[in-house]
Image: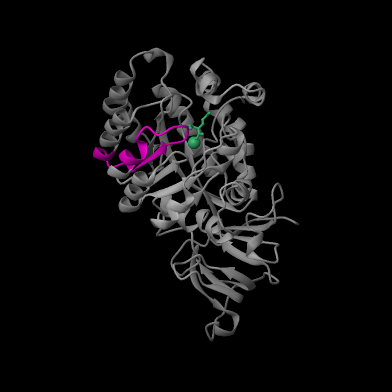
Amino acid sequence: MPTLWRNARIACLDQADRVFQSGAVITQEGRIAWVGGESELPAGLRPDRIVELAGRWLTPGLIDCHTHLVFAGQRAAEFARRTAGESYGDIARAGGGILSSMRATRSATVDELVEQSRPRLRSLTREGVTAVEIKSGYGLDLESEARMLQAAHELGAEYPVTLTTSLLAAHALPPEFDGRADDYIEILCTQWLPDLVGRKPGAGNMKSLVSAVDAYCEDIAFSAEQCDRLFSAARALGLPVRMHAEQLSNVGGSLVAARHGALSCDHLEYANERDVQALAASGTVAVMLPIAFYALAEEQRPPIALLRRHGVPLAVASDCNPGSAPTASLLLALNMARRLFGLTSAEVLQGATRNAARALGLGNELGSIEPGMAADFAVWSIDTLDEIGYWAGFNPCSMVVKSGQIELERPV
Ligand code: NIG
Ligand code: FE
């Protein structure tokens, strides 16, 4: 049942970065079967369906590889305090921040979490996002973390997205463990991880509730040594790891991430050359989160020149969360990555497609338009690819295709 998508300008985002000014894609059974110039279309092709794209740009579906989009409540009052001069760290140390979202999230049912989080995922999908990572980390007790992950899976099943989940129980120290961070890490390693890995999101669903383990390595969160122990336990269970590192200070998280071959290391504002070299050697993707940088009014930028020089693959993500990134827009993150961090349009496009796929361990499946990959794409009403990350607060996505099906068409 082949479908021919024709008369498109196509950015393949494959290794050769092929672009077709007058191109076509053939999809079959949810995958890309062929891509090339209109003039090279295979002879004798008898498509069941032809979709005319009238010269619009076609890219791989976008991938938001770092979100905390499942949570209850909001923290607008903290934003007001921060705009009046208080710091994120001070609010966290006084029991607000992540712990404030923990209190709201612990008192929510799975249905309530789904209900409250749905608008955020819906907003991402309208921007051409066809794959998303969602973290736990606001439950901070076993059953509340499980409810967050369950809510993520239920939302993922409602929308045309590929979902991956990360257990971020090492996000903040829950009050039950006050002064006993090592004990908390020990319980994560010996009890929560093995338990949650064994749980499924539903009868007949072969996925595990958890696809990776994340940690927040920071002086207001967990030490490098604690993250190291957690990552060893995760890897012993066959789970890949990712890390929030060097966001507000440098406490050695990147080196731990690199040592464990982390899929990604995220934030990195305070990373130094040694960190960058280690990430390059371990093939870890550096995920830029410019909305958090902006919303916290940070001044230290990630070392983009070093990351480029050492060839670390760059991704860009929304970081959607109620504290440091109250957003549900990956496009805004791409704009900020360009304006605030100086990334190019090519870098942000790679960062939201093939490099983001790699950050999720899905680089062989998603993130580029080439035969064999999932037929996930976004169609854009733009004149030039430079408009990706140029518009701020405007969404030029006019069609979203997931597994070869048109899931959304909207006038731009
Ligand atoms: O990625 N840095 C840690 N975690 C989030 C913020 C979480 C929150 O403040 O609720 C982040 O920025
Ligand atoms: Fe985050």
Q: Residue at x 61, y 24 (%)?
A: 73
147 vs 20, nearest the viewer: 20
Residue found farthest to the right: 411
Residue 92 drawn above or below residue 365: above
Q: Is residue 50 left or right of residue 263?
A: right
Up the image or down, 228 lies above or below 103; here it is: below
Residue 298: say if magenta: no
Picture residue at 37% right of the left edge, 32% below the top:
251
Q: Position of residue 37 (x, y in %)?
A: 57, 79
Image quarter (top left, top right, bottom left or bottom right) of the C terminus: bottom right
Using the image as rendered, state which of residue 402 and residue 183 is in the foreground.
Answer: 183
- Which span of residues is magenta-colored? 235-257
Q: Position of residue 41 (x, y in %)?
A: 55, 82
User: What residue lies at 55% left-to-right and 25% top-to-bottom?
Assistant: 88
Q: Residue furthest left?
A: 236
Residue 222 lies left or right of residue 369; in this view the side is left
